[in-house]
Image (cartoon, helix red, strand yellow):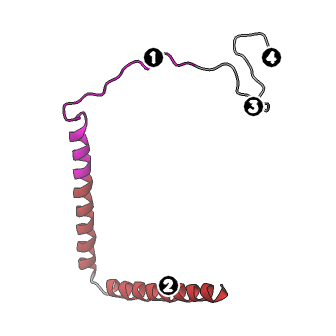
Amino acid sequence: MKKIRKSFWRAYWKLHDKKKMLVARLKGYLDGLPPKTRRRIVLAMLAAFAVLALYTFGKAVYDIGRNDGSRIVTDHAGQVELSVNPDNNHNVIPYLYGTDEE
């Protein structure tokens, strides 16, 4: 059991170190970009986000009320029967609403 746990931790820390190394390498590359290029990248990402957000909003507004011609049927549920008599559970003390009994 300890051997398995130890090997899992070893694999975890190995992956953790790899991730740290990749993040450091990417950060170094991005820090080396000129400010004009950074601004273009950020504006392109913002534009892509804005287009997708507007598309999602427009599609949702367009689809409001469209049910392919079908309507939601609202009907009365009918009378619901409620049992007043409790089950044979001795842990529950029944209280009958509308009576003077306690």
Task: Tell me the crowding category of disc 4: few under 14, some 14 to 19, or many 20 or more residues within 10 angstroms, Cα based.
Answer: few
- Which disc, if any, is residue 78? 1
Asked if residue 16 is among those painted magenta in the image, a careful observer would answer no
Marks 4/2: CA–CA distance? 66 Å
Upstream in the sequence, badge 4 or badge 1? 1
85 left or right of 64? right
- Which disc, if any, is residue 102? 4
Return the residue at label 3: 89
Marks 2/3: CA–CA distance? 56 Å
Amino acid type, residue under disc 4 in the picture: Glu
Upstream in the sequence, badge 4 or badge 2? 2
| Secondary element type, mark 3 | loop
Q: Nearer the viewer, mark 4 or mark 2?
A: 4
Residue drawn at x 24%, y 78% is 36
Task: Point out residue 85 in the picture as x, y percentages from the top left corner.
Answer: 69, 20
Residue drawn at x 50%, y 89% is 14
Q: Nearer the viewer, mark 2 or mark 1?
A: 1
Task: Point out residue 54 in the picture as x, y percentages from the top left corner.
Answer: 24, 51
Upstream in the sequence, badge 2 or badge 3? 2
Q: Nearer the viewer, mark 2 or mark 3?
A: 3
Marks 3/1: CA–CA distance? 29 Å
Amino acid type, residue under disc 1 in the picture: Gly
Return the residue at label 2: 16
Q: Nearer the viewer, residue 12 or 27?
A: 12
Asked if residue 70 is among those painted magenta in the image, a careful observer would answer yes
Amino acid type, residue under disc 3 in the picture: Asn
49 left or right of 27? left
Q: Give, as a single range, the part of the protein colored magenta.
A: 54-81
Residue 38 occupies which quadrant of the picture?
A: bottom left
| Secondary element type, mark 4 | loop
Q: Nearer the viewer, residue 1 or 6?
A: 1
